[in-house]
Structures are given as C-alpha cells and as structure tokens.
Image: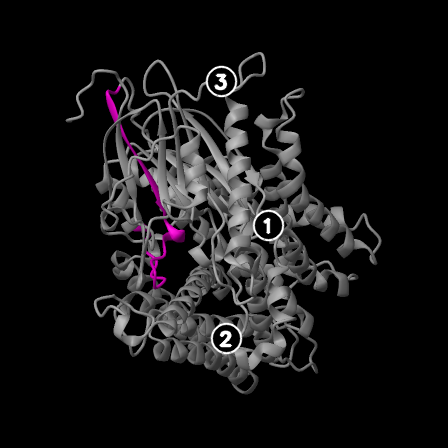
Amino acid sequence: MRRRLQPHHIYIVEAALTGAFFVQSLRFLIGMIYSRTAGASIVNSLPSSQIPTDIPNLAEPSIVSTEVTYLIFIVVALPLLTLILGRFKWWLTIGTIILAVGRFLMLSQADSTSFTPTMAASLAVAGGLVVIAQVVRFRLQSLPYFFILGLGIDQLLRAVGNTVDPSFDSDYQPTQIVLSLIAIALSILVFIWERRRLQAATDTRAVSADHGLLPFWSGIALAGLLFIELSLLALPNAIAGRADADYTTFVPFTLLATLLPLLPQIRVRARNFILLFDSGVRGWAWLLIIALMIVFGTRIQTVLLSNDAINIGEIQLGAIALVISQFMVSMMWWWLARPRGEQERTFAGLWLIISVGVFALLIAGDFFTYEYAFVRNLRPELDFLNPIIPPLLRGFRGLGLPIILFALFLAGIPMLYWHRRVPWQGGSGWATLFSLLTIVGAAIGAAFAARPPLVESETNIERMRVATYNIHAAYDEFFNYDLEQIAFDIQVSGASVVLLQEIEAGRLTSFGVDQPLWLARQLGMDVRFYPTNEGLQGLAVLSKVPIVFDEGDLLTSEGNQTGLQHVQIRPDDGIITIYNTWLGLLQDRGDNRPIEEQEQDQQQQLEELLLLIAEDHLTPEGQPGQLGRTILGGTFNNVPDSPLLERVREIGLIDPHDTDTFEDFTTLRRTGIRARVDYLWLNSLELCGANVLQDSASDHHLAFASVKIRRGADCEA
C-alpha cells in the first residue's frame, strides 16, 4: 500500500492540471495581447468625442498600457525570484498557487478594469514559469508530463468545443474553481509528504535523478517547442488547414501523437532507433526528419493531392506527415533539461525570462506573415527608420514555413548539444499498461467529441436567402472578439448560404479556433474553406443547401494575398455556381503609394477573377458559354460608382442592393466611416428582396438577398 502512495504518482496528476492551466493561459494571453493592443491603437487614433461610450471592454490605451507593463513586470519578477527562492521546495507550491489562482481569475475578472483577464492570464503564465523552473530543479522526470499532458488536455477540450476551448467561457467558472483547488491541494500535500520523507532520510546530500538543470540553450529550446506546438502541431485544425485535410479524421491521431511518448516502450524503441546514428549526428538526423515531414505536410502534399493518375488525394499524406512530426516533437520534451551535478548552480529563472523573449519574437514573426500588408510607416519623429523597419516587416510575406523551421532548429539545440546523452528511458509493465489505456481512452473520447453533427440539407426549395459577411476574424472595430455573436448574426439573417471573408482556421491571434468549422457546426451547416494565406486565413462558404463541388484560385496580390473561391450547390435538379472573393484593400500606409496604383491592383485581381469565371463556363468547343445561375459575392473594397464595380455590371451581373438609399445598404461602418464595400451579384436568379443587417459583431455588416429557385414561386415565405 505504501508504494501506491508515493508522491511520484501524484506528481503526474498535478503536472496534468498545472500543464493544462499553463497552456490554456498562454493561448489566451496571446489572443488578448493582440486584441487589446490593436483595440488601443484604434482608440488612440480617434478623437475622444467620436468614441462610443457603450462599448463593453473598450481597450482604453491607459488600461492596455498598464496590462502590458504588468505582463512584462510579472513574467520577469517571478522567475527572477526563483534565483533566490528556488532552493526552497515550498516555492514550487507558491508557483502552483499563483498559476491556479491566475487561471481562475481569467474567468472571474471578465468585467474588471482594475485587474483585467489579460492581467490574470499574465499572472497565470508567470506562475507557470515558476512551476517549470521548480519542476526542473526538484522533479525533473515530471517535466515532460507537464507539457505533454497539458497539450493533450487542451486538445481534448477543444475537440469537445469544436476547436473552441470551453474553459474560456464564464459558465466554466465553477469547474475551474474545483480544478484550481485540487491543484493547490495536491501541491500542498506533496510538499508535506516530501518534507517528512526528507526529515526521515539518512543522507540528504545524495544526488537524485530528479534534480535537474535548465541551461541557457534549453531556455531557447523551450521557446521553439512552445511555438511549434501552439501554432501548428498541437492543433488538429491547424494541421488540417495547412495540409488541406479533414479535421475530424485527424483529431484522435494528433492526440495519439502527442501522448504516445508517455509510453515507456515507445521511448525505448525511439532510443534504439536514435542509437543507430553516430552520436555527433543523432540530433541532426532527428531534426532533419521532422523538418522534411513539416515541409512535405505544408507544401509538397498539395501537388500530390492533385495527381489524379495515382489517386493519392484520398490518403491525405500531408496531414499524416504533420502528425508524425507532432509525435517526434513531443518526444523532444525529454531533452529540454538534464540532471544536475552536485556542485552545479541553476539559473533557470533567468533563462526562462530569455525564453519568453524569444517566444514573443517568434509570435511577432508569425503575426507579420499574415499582417504584412497592413504595416504602416512610423511616425514623423521616427521617419529615419522608415527605410528599414516597415520594408523588413512587410518582407515577412510567405515566411510562415521558414519561421516554423527556425523554431524547430531552436527546439532541437539540446539534442545537438547533449549528443552523448539519450534521456528516453523505459519503465515498468504496469506503467506501460496504465499509460496505454489512458492514451487510447483519450483518443477515443476525442474522436467521439469531434464527430461532425448531422446536417439537415435543404433540397427542392422554392426560394433561398444568400448572404456575404466579412467577419474580420470575429473582431469588431475595436477588436473585441465575439465569434458567438458572428454566429448569431448569421442565424438572424436567415441565410441558407453565406459567403465569408477574412476568416481564420487556427491562428494564434484568434485563439487557435477553426472559425469556419465552429460556425458550421454551431449553425448546422456544411462548410468549405479556401485558404489564401499560410493555410489558416482565407475564404469560406457555409451552406444548408448541398455542396457538390468546391475549389479555389489565388489572385495576384501586391497587398494581402487573396483569391477566388468557387463552390457549386444543388438546391434542385440543377446547380447554382457561387464565387466568393476578397479584393485588395485601399489604404494609406504612409508610404506615399497613391490610391490609383492600389486600384490598379484591384482591377488586375478583378480581371483575373472574371477570366476564371469565364473559363469555368466555356463550351466544349472552347467558346464563351452562358453563366447560368450564378452568384458572385464578397468584399470588393470599393464604392458602387467606381470603375471597378462598373466592370462587374458590364458582364451582366445584377446588384440586388443597387438603390439610392445609401445609408440602408452601407456595409463598412466604423467610427466616422460609412461605405458600401461588400456586394452580392446575381445572374439568372429572380430577386425577391435584399437588405443589410444593421447590427454586427464585425466591422463589416452582413448583406443578404432573397432569390427564387423555382420559377413561379411566391416571394413570400
């Protein structure tokens, strides 16, 4: 009985809870820092008299400045205190308490302005850093469990929430209270237990395998590992987005890949494999295999999937390669720290601060791979930096994969440095059996939770409502995130088919959520997503009418990369062809690029778009054919009387919102700005009516039109 009550068995439970708290808090903090700083920049750019007073959680610049200052202070101060207090085991308990309390306060402080959810997340992350430093120092063998189980629980919860973490919802608060109290109680219990065992020990100077060291390069590696996991490999929807694969299929396999390294027999086999290589090249071999898998999964698979001659598309090789990469990266947590010699001193707190800095730089790099087109020149007093900084940041276009590979190199530094040591060790048969049952059970649970709901298709209908909605990644003008309100807007519109723009499938700044998938499952609709930027940002079509075909093409883009999504639906015996797009944005970036030149980019994109539409409707003889029932919609980023929109009218498409009542049909409504930039164009479809939803969770408003499907049908429902 005494063996069953050893602290080591409680370590794993405690590591699972604290690891989950840390991963959840870190994801939340990334999204909140993005939204709060972006919102504050909008507020700062507007006269105070124009800022609405009824906006909840408005990002006041003074409050956001306090939040950022608090974040910097707390993630520096607590790890630095570890340099002084780290030799005391009770400091681990204090770190656990800080982490657990901060995780709870993220939910309880939702409406607070004195201690905001962003501050609470900062407190939780800082507490997590203390826990990491102390676990390395006193419980080295538990360190991989902290990260692996934390990421595994995060995946399981997101499977339940259709990629949304349900633990961020206020309804989760009672559950979080219980979990936080359990984590604190376990930490106190283990501390008392270890103290009694230490008092009973005869030799307190013995070197333990649980006494570890986190060197400088391991701090750098931690930043790389966290970035790879949070941005890609530990998110099944990010894997599905970048590899053009089915999300539901790969949820259980991604979780298996994450958790399998916990099996002692798996670690033994991995050890036997890596020992086949010379000690000087082991780390390089491991990293090279992962790098090749990531490149294959995000790039090469696109060519293979389109090769109809060998029908490779059904195998989804790209996602398989990324899942294998996740397994190999998950194995790397054992290399993060090493046993500490009796005379060695630890500076883990200091190296963790540097780790946070490197992680922040990787996050910034990832951010600009999406937002490069919106980089503005610096203020006049910093004009001397404009030839350097803005072009550098705009140069991040297309660098998503290189940043991931760079992070992988950082993550692998310990494997390169400690090439003579292989930390993968086996364990008892009972440990293997228990771990296997837990892992298989978790994978089955994830597969069950991620299964898609049954979609009740609308067929043989007489009329249909179609809408276009630029959701701005679920952020409003002041960057308050509300994906549930986006779903409500679509539901209220009554649309059976919705064309969505600026939608994301797993970016860090949108909390890792697959927005097309979540909206589709929330609304009981089918979905097709076409990525235009780094596999996770693009266009989507939601439909209650059966979708029978979909594809997409990129358009030439000097600014933000965009494209044309082509979807066909079958409401009756025939089909309706739908085209969804988002043309380049006209903006003043402070680089003296004239609007006329930007409009030329739009014109080029439109001509390419019209050419693609014409090619879709060629006759067998290669002659231009009839468009038939066609809908073209999206964000055109220009006004109705512009030459750009006149060109669309020239090919015979009808604008259902073409009216003199300008105010009723404006779709871009920001403070001091009213414009119509979102359009629906119809061909061979009889119009019953059109309107614009007046309220919106985005800075764009949903525009919709009702059309007849069956001739002679009544427009009235």
**Which part of the image, by quadrant, shows the C terminus?**
top left
Between 170 and 663, the one nearer to me in the picture: 663
Query: Which x, y percent locates residue 485?
Result: 27, 51
Closer to the N terminus: mark 3 or mark 2?
2
> For mark 1, what is the residue?
261
**Which part of the image, by quadrant, shows the N terminus?**
bottom left
- Per the image, label 1 sits on a secondary structure element best described as helix
Between 225 and 604, the one nearer to me in the picture: 604
Amino acid type at mark 2: Val
Closer to the N terminus: mark 1 or mark 2?
2
Foreground tag (1 vs 2): 2
Residues at circles 3 and 1 in contact by the CB criterion of under 8 Å? no
> Residue placed at 57% from the left, 45% from the top?
257
Residue 372, image quadrant: bottom right
Query: Which x, y percent locates residue 443?
Result: 47, 41
Foreground tag (3 vs 1): 3
Asked if the magenta segment contains residue 412, the reply would be no
> For mark 2, what is the residue?
130
Q: Which residues are magenta?
A: 461-484
Amino acid type at mark 1: Pro
> For mark 3, what is the residue?
625
